[in-house]
Amino acid sequence: MHTVNLDGRSITVGKIVCIGRNYAEHIKELGNKTPDKAVIFMKPASAIVAPGGTVAIPDYSNDCHHEIELAVLIGKAAKGVCAAEALDHVSGYAVALDLTLRDVQNTQKEKGLPWEIAKGFDTSCPLSAFVPANQVRNPQNLQLKLTVNGKIRQNGNTGDMMRTIAELVAEVSSYFTLEEGDILLTGTPSGVARITSGDRLEASIEGVGKLVVSVA
C-alpha cells in the first residue's frame, strides 16, 4: 500500500493516470502527431518514489528519459464531470517525474503494444509532497523547472498545456471514475533527455514544491 500526505492527512494512492502529448513543443521534439483526444496511460502506485529517493533504471533499457510534470491529487470521486466543475474534485498538487524508458516505449509503439512496461516500472514516478489545492492560486500559470547535475534540462509553464487540468479531469472521468487518492499526471514540456547512473535530478514547480532524487 502506498500513501501520500496532504495537510497532515495520510491518503492511500489508487491509480496514477498519466497524460501524454499535452505540450506542443514536447510533441514536436519527439516527432509525434498532435492527438485529437487526450493520450491516457497508467502507472501503478508501486512506481512512486519519495523525495530524496533513488531511481533504479531496469536492465532491459538503455535510454531512460526524465519528464517533469504537475501532479494532481483527486480529493473526491469524479465520474462524467464537466470541466467547469472538475477542479472541485482536486484536493492537492505536487511535483512529479514521469520517467520513461524511451527505447522500450518506441519498440512497443512500433508493435502497436501498450506502453506500461516503459512507463510503469518500479521507481518510475518520483513524487514530492502535496500542497492543498487552495494554496495554488492559478495552477494554469506555474513555472516547471528540471535540472540534472545542476544543468537546466526542462523549463516550461503549465499555461502551455494543450488541455487544461479541468479539461483533463473531465475527459478522464468520462472514461472511468476517478476516486479519492488517484493521481493525475498532466504532461511534460519540451527538453526531455536521457538520465544515467549517478545523476542527480532536481525538479521544482513554483508555488507547489521541489523534488530531488538520484539515479542508482
Image: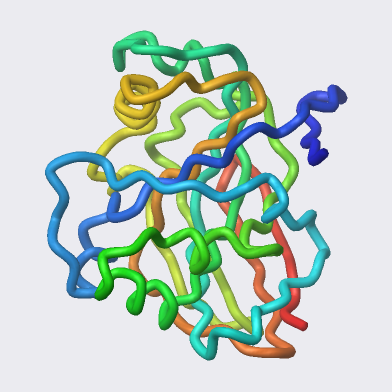
Q: Is residue 199 left or right of residue 170?
A: right
Snapshot quadrant of residue 156:
bottom left
Residue at 49 percent of width and 47 percent of height: 42
Residue at 65% over, 32% down: 14
Is 75 situated above or below 58?
above
In the depicted view, which residue is nearer to us: 213 or 100? 100
- Viewer-closest of 146 and 47: 47
Left or right: residue 102 compared with residue 129: left
Q: Position of residue 52 (x, y in %)?
A: 82, 64
Q: Is residue 210 above or below residue 70?
A: below
Q: How is the image coloured?
A: rainbow
Res 145 visible: no
Q: Position of residue 178 (x, y in %)?
A: 50, 22
Q: Quadrant of the C terminus?
A: bottom right
Out of 128 and 62, give the one closest to the viewer.
Answer: 62
Number of numbered discs on residues: 0
Image spot of residue 110 (x, y percent): 25, 75
Residue 24 picture quarter: bottom left
Q: Nearer the viewer, residue 202 or 17?
A: 17
Q: Which residue lies at the image location 80% right of the left edge and 24% below the top edge?
A: 7
Residue found at x 23% / y 44%: 162
Q: Is any part of residue 135 visible from this angle?
A: yes
Which quarter of the figure is the N terminus placed in? top right
